[in-house]
Amino acid sequence: MERKQIAAGNWKMNMDYNEGRDLAKAVVSGLQPSDVLVVLGTPYIHLKNINGIIKDVSNIKLAAQNCHQEENGAYTGEVSAAMLKSCGVDFVILGHSERREYFGEDDKLIARKIDIVLRHGMQPIYCCGEKLEVREAGKHEELVGEQVKTALAHLTKEQMAQVVVAYEPVWAIGTGKTATPGQAQQMHKHIRSILREKFGKEVADATSILYGGSVKPGNAREIFAQPDVDGGLIGGAALKASDFLAIADSF
Ligand code: PEP
């Protein structure tokens, strides 16, 4: 098993239908051939169309930003894993801090979402990370460790091999404040050590752990150079093709 380098964009609730199409086309046309996997995490309305735009490019994949934990049923306004799969989705971002903050998601619920995404043959991008007050209290490793264990510890080794982890300190998301490369490395190493305890060295070493939080073309290279940082989950900078492409070129 080999660890993949990944540049994943999270468009959040941005880009209308035409803007999203144009952004995906600009990423496809500017992308250099490389081993880096580029992931476009788009709102639901874009998935099917962008699947068509990226289908001939082997190193671009499609991500949704959420999915419901049940198979189907009376959940008005929700979208199921089977629906995502049928639109060509490869990855699903789960547990983003905005889902935790504004939609009350916790790691027990996220664990159920991870299960259903895996059951439908897609790969979860599991997000974790601490708020500023937790870091200031020196409890960040403990908290992130608990998040990771609650959401992932029940998986088999084979299932864990499908999961990408994204460490996103909440205080760095959309704030312009970035963790230092040293802070990112320290937490990524900690997460990998938890994965090693639970799933063994081979799975832990093969898990891509992404950093998220105000990654920009100007700081990506230094962060991605850390030994346990395997790429980024990119919010704001993923909305401009040239910035996102520059980040994808920063490994
Ligand atoms: C994110 O949305 O996951 C994120 C990291 O956002 P930003 O890059 O804007 O901080």
Image (tube, helix red, strand yellow):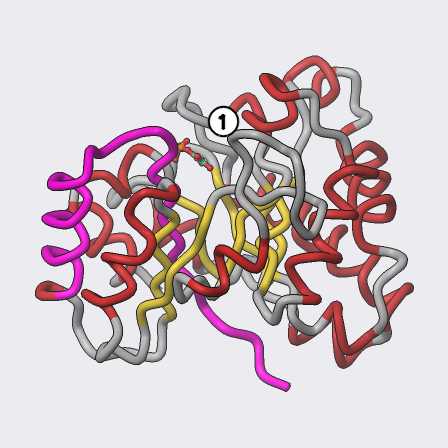
Q: Position of residue 27 (x, y in %)?
A: 17, 58
Name the residue furthest front: 74
Residue 84 as seen in the image, left or right of residue 144: left
Specify the quadrant of the image occupied by residue 119. bottom right
Q: Residue at x 38, y 43 (%)?
A: 44
Residue 50, compared with residue 46, is above or below; it is: below
Q: Position of residue 173 (x, y in %)?
A: 47, 27
Secondary structure under tag 1 reads: helix
Name the residue furthest top: 133
Specify the quadrant of the image occupied by residue 11. top left
User: What type is the residue that disc 1 sits on?
Assistant: Ala
Q: Position of residue 7 (x, y in %)?
A: 38, 58
Q: Which of 75 and 203 is in front in this view?
A: 75
Residue 249, compared with residue 113, is above or below; it is: below
Residue 146 as seen in the image, left or right of residue 95: right
Q: Residue at x 74, y 19 (%)?
A: 134
Number of numbered callouts drawn = 1
**Which range is magenta?**
1-28
Q: Quadrant of ligand 1?
A: top left
Residue 47 as seen in the image, left or right of residue 244: right
- Looking at mark 1, is its residue's CB closer than 8 Å to ligand 1? yes
The residue wearing badge 1 is: 172
Q: Nearer the viewer, residue 105 or 88?
A: 88
Is 20 magenta? The answer is yes
Residue 139 as seen in the image, left or right of residue 235: right
Q: Residue at x 38, y 60 (%)?
A: 62
Is 192 magenta? The answer is no
